[in-house]
Image: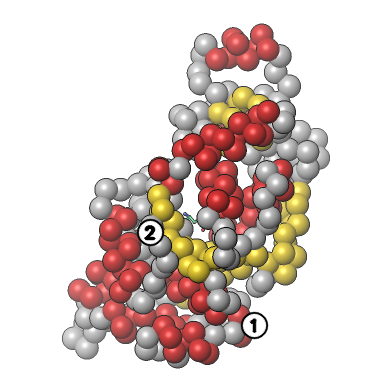
Amino acid sequence: MTSAGRFAPSPSGELHVGNLRTAILAWLFARSTGRRFLMRVEDLDRARSGAEAEQLRDLAAVGVTWDGDVVRQTDRGTLYTEAIGRLAAAGLTYECFCTRREIQEAPSAPHAPQGAYPGTCRELSAAEREAKRAVRPAAVRLRSAVTEVTVQDVLHGSYTGVVDDFVLRRNDGVTAYNLAVVVDDAAQGIDQVVRGDDLLPSTPRQAYLASLLNIPVPEYAHVPLVLNADGARLAKRDGAVTLTDLAAVGAPVDEVRDALLGSLRLPGGPLAHALAAFDPAALPREPWIWPGMAGPDA
Ligand code: GLU
């Protein structure tokens, strides 16, 4: 399988300029290294009807192209079940009956890192599990043998983060993001993962899971986010931040694309120009504060 990069949007609503900027970067990283570029819709959770089509339309409008068909996670349940089955067969999973609240209120295990699952259900007896199953369905957690893992990132260097007994399948039956992303990246031959740096803290968990599944760990590049004027992650409530809204205030898509490229210190115009000038080492390492955009009569 040839190597590939990807963009993996969650179809919960329209993409905002921050998402589009990350997609452009993922495309530039992949294309500048001769990789294929794949589009995967992460629709296991919070999918909104119509959002996928809007997102793909907006990605195409800024010049992001992809190879082959769009893949949807909801079509890939068998792969996830098979991976969880392999982990279970190796004794690497357990059932967890904790509610969110119980986890928050549980005393954390000694030496456990902040935010780690406290291990409440790790050593339940068969009889205890049986009794709990009658009360509520179980989530499936990974029986992790480590508490932290170090990954290498093109932009962040060595990054060490928490690995706990994280959830593989939620108790409503939905496959957890951390499992799906690892299984999909491997099955699709993706060996370069470029995404927002809000996902850097999840990466040690994913790399650990890949190692347990005998999957090669991809190259990671976690790119800086776009923030609003208050320094918070850009969101829909920050005004005109989608292509539709920006067009409505007089900023056509080509101008938006060029503003995004400019924020990356890359030339505007069709993405081929930015591709010719692309150098990961020259990328800004700081988040970009969205300055807003408006047409002449705004
Ligand atoms: N679907 C995730 C998101 O939209 C991205 C996952 C990934 O790139 O690994 O935030």
Pair 2/1: label in front: 2
Q: Which residue is at 76% across, 57% downward?
A: 150
Q: Residue at label 1? A: 281
Q: Is residue 215 visible?
A: yes
The quarter of the displayed image where residue 250 is located: bottom left
- At mark 2, the secondary structure is loop
Depth check: 101 or 1 in front? 1
> Residue, x 24% and y 69% (percent of image)?
244
Q: Position of residue 230 (x, y in %)?
A: 46, 68
Q: Position of residue 68 (x, y in %)?
A: 40, 62
Q: Badge 1: how crowded within 10 Å, few (<14), some, or many (20+)?
A: few
Q: For disc 2, does the CB lie below 8 Å from ligand 1?
A: no
Query: Residue tagged by mark 2?
Result: 69
* Residues packed near mark 2 inside 10 Å, few (<14), some (14 to 19) or many (20 plus): few
Q: Residue drawn 68% across and 12% down?
A: 126
Looking at numbered disc 1 in the image, what kind of residue is underneath it? Answer: Ala
Out of 34 and 203, give the one closest to the viewer: 34
Q: Residue furthest front?
A: 1
